[in-house]
Image (spheres, helix red, strand yellow):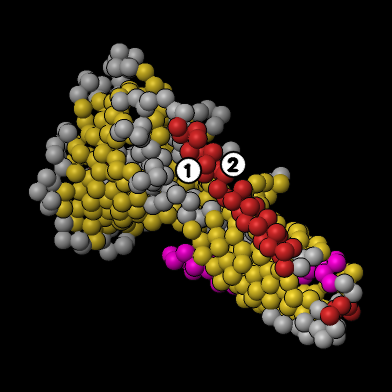
Amino acid sequence: MGVDLIFRLILFLYLICTLFLSPILAKDSKDTQKSPPPKTATYKYWNADRRILDLKGNPQTFYGQVYYDVAYNKEGRIKTVTRMGENREPQETYHLIWNRSGTQSEYKIEFLTAGNASRLDDYLYSNKLSHVRPGWIADIKSRKDGRPKEVSFSDKLGFTYYSYTFNYSYDRSVEMEVVESSYFDSNGDFVGRHLIFREGDAWLNMIQYYDENNQIIDTHELIHDFGKEETIRIITDASGREITRKIIPFMQPDKYAYRLEWTGREIIDHTTDEGKIADYIPKSFLSFSYGFPIVVGTALVNNESKTGYTIGLGRRNFFKIGSMKMNIGLEMNWIDFPSAKPANHVQTLSYFLVGQMNPKIPWNFIPANLEIGLKFGGGLISPGYGIVGGLSTQFNLAPTPLFIGLTANGVIASGMADNIALTYWGTFGLVFGLNFDDK
């Protein structure tokens, strides 16, 4: 049996290498076949949040229009993006700094002409604190999805004139994403804030402005008429009295806007076909669990039941069944049912390939950091075979990568011992683990 266990352990390690290392090696192989990256290019469209360029051309193509001159670094990643005005004069330059793997970046914006910060985004910034001068720098700290969370506006000497912070949430009572923009003066004193409400498909619905005492100033409501392809803007004062009502050009969402939908557990970004979690969830995890048998089959009734241990390694959202995303992982389990009778003695290892899905139960009392997993799989239970099913509840201890939870598993096994053809057992215990980003 010792040789058999060694063989199965080697097989388990081989499966780990195949599952987790082959995608990385394949990516590296593709990277070596890429053509030399371009040094410069010109585009009509630039989305700073997503670091996306679109509609490639040349300055002559965009004569009399706004366009963007782009420079790349030696790895082919965007280094600078300069917005050119209709008169072909540079307006501001985005300077990007990437991490080593090229998966995330931070950036600063150097203003080359005077104007307002609202030229960076029509809705995030307020007229209260917006003026910029040539040479000023906007230092942006980004969330993991690329959108800004903090922005400070300073001169070349480093003096900060004002700053903004942004919070992103989802209001289930109105089924809208809410972006809170708060602004502070050079002393760090609160000056005001406004709330931006967007419906699930990124349509701007309303903006509410508040003063330094957090009292509402006015509300801008936007009604989109899809039939007439026009937008009606209604402005009301603090008392709710209508001040103006005006028809403005149809305000369609940006092509690369964050289109969000609340599932009851998380905000899903539907901008790409596969969908991304807006608040980034690491793709891989490592877990350790232990459980005590609480139910055993008749073949194990006379055996001693001891604590079993499991080491697991997996990847989240590895594939889909219909619209259901599935985690996949490999588990190595220590099974311990000793007996005085050698024919009934069970003390061995099992190697299971398992899949796990989150049913995403939309109950309000379930915390957002609680993940419920339904598990099923099968594999080798030396010297036999078996299948496993289970349920786990896992608390992700954000912002740390750690998690802790409860786990319950049921196993049906065949051929584990000379005198045990078929049996089963169920365990209940604790699970600990570590989420980690793929770099």
Closer to the N terminus: mark 1 or mark 2?
1
Q: Residues within 10 Å of mark 1 (few under 14, many from 20)?
A: many
Q: Position of residue 109 (x, y in %)?
A: 24, 40
**Is disc 1 placed on a helix, strand or loop?**
loop
- SS label for mark 2: loop
Q: Choose mark 1 or mark 2, whichever is in front.
A: 2
Is 404 within the magenta?
Answer: yes
Quarter occupied by residue 364: bottom right
Residue placed under numbered mark 1 in the picture: 258
Q: Amino acid at mark 1?
A: Tyr
Q: Which residues are magenta?
A: 396-417
Q: Residue at x 78, y 85 (%)?
A: 304
Percent coordinates x, y for residue 405 in the rendering: 59, 72
Residue name at image x 68 percent, y 63 percent: 6
Residue to which mark 2 is pinned: 274
| Residue 428 visible somewhere in the drawing | no
How dense is the environment of label 2, judged by Cα within 10 Å: few (below 14), some, or many (20 and up)?
few
Is 199 included in the stretch rendered in magenta?
Answer: no
Compared with 226, 307 (above or below) is below
Residue pictured at 49% horizontal, 68% vertical: 402
Q: Is residue 417 above or below residue 185?
A: below
Examine the rendering and report whether any part of residue 256 can be seen: yes
Give left or right: position of 31 versus 299. Answer: left
The type of residue carrying mark 2 is Glu
Q: x, y (%) of residue 286?
A: 55, 63
Task: Determine the residue positioned at 30% across, 20% down.
Answer: 65
